[in-house]
Amino acid sequence: MSAHFQPSERAQAASQQGPAWALMQKVKTLPKYHPEKVPHGVVNLSGALNSLMEHWMAFRIGQEMFPMSECLSYGPLTGSEDLLNAAAGLFNRFFNPSEPVRAQNILAANGVTSLMDMMAWTLCDPGDGVLYPTPNFYMLDYNMTARAGLKTIPVSTTGLTDPFEHERLIKAYIAVCFSSVTLQIHKVDAPLVERLRV
């Protein structure tokens, strides 16, 4: 790349943030597993994409008649009405929430990294803290710090019967000196993010 058109200093610094980013770049260069063509290839379990289902998905999509106007045009910023209604139904059916989840309670985005970045930018200012229980989504620290400039505060759940035990979260909150702290809760394997202002 020409020296006159380098990325910003902020972007260059973000590209060097930690081993998780470097590992992701390395994994992209390795051969992907295929049961016949590449039986010794890599099965990447580090993200939400399931490459083992690509052939099934291609077949399934070929069997469906999707309205192409919806697929090839700008859709709603927070997800289609059908998607939000389906997600609300899934949460209500399988998670038995104390109050029913409605479609208008849900925000859809094009991946957890985008969603985390939007939430961090919207709810927090640079230097604010984010409490999160560990173990956790391994790119969380990068997603919270690279652009939004937040401080991540891991809270160990080792030995807890209830990983969301509030006393340990309160102790971690008191121990730090940030103007504002956000609590992040999600599943480790497929992040579902909820943030609460503290």
Image (cartoon, grey):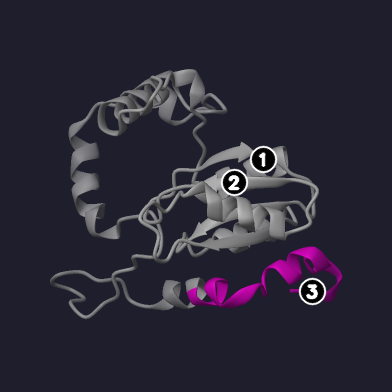
Label 1 to label 2, Cα distance in Å?
Answer: 7 Å
Please state which amino acid type lies under the numbered disc 2. Answer: Leu
Q: Is residue 8 magenta?
A: yes
In the image, what residue type sits under mark 1? Answer: Val
Sequence-first disc among 3 and 2: 3
Residue 178, numbered circle: none
First in sequence: mark 1 vs mark 2: 2
Element at label 1:
loop
Give the mark nearer the N terminus: 3 vs 1. Answer: 3
Residue under label 1 = 198
**Residue placed furthest toward the left:** 36
**Callouts 1 and 2 close, C-beta under 8 Å:** yes
- Marks 3/1 in contact by CB < 8 Å: the verdict is no
Q: Closer to the observer: label 3 or label 2?
A: 2
For the point 47% across and 78% down, which residue is it? Answer: 26
Classify residue 134 as left or right of residue 15.
left
Residue 53: percent from the left, percent from the top? 23, 53
Residue that mark 3 sits on: 2
Q: Nearer the viewer, mark 3 or mark 1?
A: 1
Q: Nearer the viewer, residue 58 or 194?
A: 194
Residue 166, horizontal then vertical, whole percent:
52, 47
Residue 183, numbered label: 2
Kind of element beneath mark 2? strand
Q: Which residues are magenta?
A: 1-23
Q: Which residue appears at 25% of the width and 71% of the height? A: 33
In the displayed structure, 86 sits above or below 49; it is above
Quick check: is 4 in the magenta stretch? yes
- The residue type indicated by label 3 comes to Ser
As drawn, is 69 to the left or to the right of 124? left
Q: Quadrant of residue 18?
A: bottom right
